[in-house]
Image (cartoon, helix red, strand yellow):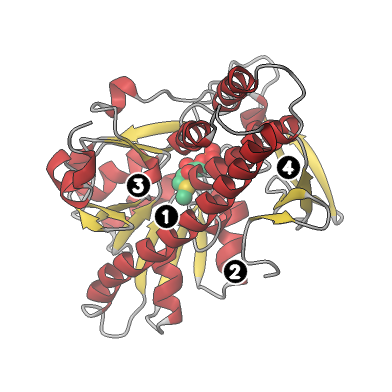
Amino acid sequence: MGNPQTIWYNHQKQLVETIDQRKLPFQNLIIEIGTLEEAGNAISEMVVRGAPLIGVTAGYGMYLAARYYAGNDFQAEMKLVAEKLKSTRPTAVNLAFAVDEALSVISGQISISENVKKLFDYAENLKQREIGFSKNIGKHGLEIIKAVSETKNGEPVQILTHCNAGRLACVELGTATAPIYLAHEAGIPVHVWVDETRPRNQGARLTAWELGEAGIPHTIIPDNTGGHLMQHKMVDMVIVGSDRATLNGDVANKIGTYLKALAAADNGIPFYVALPSTTIDWTLNDGIAEIPIEQRNASEVSVMEGLLDGEVHEFSILPAKSAVANYGFDVTPARLVTGLITERGVCNATREGILKLFPEKANR
Ligand code: MRU
């Protein structure tokens, strides 16, 4: 698997390195991020993607911006940098969380080089926090998988997931996949139904690759297959990640997640959302009305990549004159969510449930 982390600071080269996720599964390439612009492009071009990893990359982006700062109003410049980074991808709140937190460590009372050091430490610290969050999400989610497994007479627990909320979306382990990795390690038989996740196919390209590397049994399915599987009792539970959740338990995740939640509810199948607290937007109460939904380029829908004679090629797959809409995310209302798996435990997708685990957020 190589480096189990998805992003790291290379002290010898003095820059950040990450996996170029646009190239997987055909090529496993490391790409360097040495400037603010490269960090911003890596996020907007989806070299890195997935809410926690976007946040950590933005943290390093703030550090890189400060390192090369050469103007005369450091604090004002860093505020502009923060806005620039935030605009690269609007839905995943981890990005805004990271740049705002990074801004809060900057001080006018110390030198720029001391601020640069603080920002570096902040980025490294955020990365370590995300690793810890994933581990704890894994532990709490594992208990749910264990309980389902006890009803299965040794048969694999059938888990459906959408998009990639795996280690590639985080730093290690993932969110939705963390309990799956731990269950597999603990010898609990699991099988994962992997939604291909059009248009960018993060499920087929990334989740399947990750699970394959870890030796976890999985099957890739076209996006519209889940409902049929659920009707035929071929899915025991759904676990997905999230890009932004509201205080009342609504969750934004990759487009198509809502339809899986509807199908799960119709078939009495538990639908869990695994997310660190860095994905909760404590200021919002109504996901459908308030979460900004990213719209991306039509070419993600109209052009697909694939291998031909061992080489990667792009293929146009639509009539050239047809209009295309490409909404990146949708919102699953809290009423369809069985539980939120967080780093502090599992809770109901309600204001009360969330605040029971995070009481310090109650008076915001
Ligand atoms: O557009 P992407 O690939 O960044 O979308 C990612 C997702 O929707 C993930 O499910 C989400 O970020 C959860 S990450 C642990």
Q: Nearer the viewer, mark 3 or mark 4?
A: 3
Query: Which residue in the protein does label 2 denote?
Result: 212
Q: Secondary structure at mark 3?
A: helix
> Where is residue 297 shown, x and y percent of the image?
63, 23
Q: Is residue 200 visible?
A: no
Of callouts 3 and 4, the N-terminal one: 3
Q: Is residue 319 visible?
A: yes
Is 11 positioned to the left or the right of 58 in the image? right
Quadrant housing the C terminus: top left
Of callouts 4 and 1, the N-terminal one: 1
Label 1 – label 2 distance at C-alpha: 15 Å
Of callouts 4 and 2, the N-terminal one: 2
Q: Secondary structure at mark 2?
A: helix
Residues under numbered marks 1 and 3 in contact, where contact means CB atoms less than 8 Å apart: no
> Is 64 or 116 nearer to us in this picture?
116
Mark 2 burial class by Cα count in 10 Å: few <14, some 14-19, many 20+: few
Query: Which residue in the protein does label 4 denote?
Result: 305
Is 111 positioned to the left or the right of 293 in the image? right
Label 1 – label 3 distance at C-alpha: 20 Å
Q: Nearer the viewer, mark 4 or mark 2?
A: 2
- Going 27% across and 63% down the picture, which residue do you hit? 233
Q: Nearer the viewer, mark 3 or mark 2?
A: 3
Quadrant housing the N terminus: bottom right
Query: Which residue in the protein does label 1 denote?
Result: 161
Q: Which mark is residue 192?
A: none
Query: Which residue in the protein does label 3 denote?
Result: 277
- Going 42% across and 50% down the picture, which residue do you hit? 225
> Is 180 or 267 nearer to us in this picture?
180
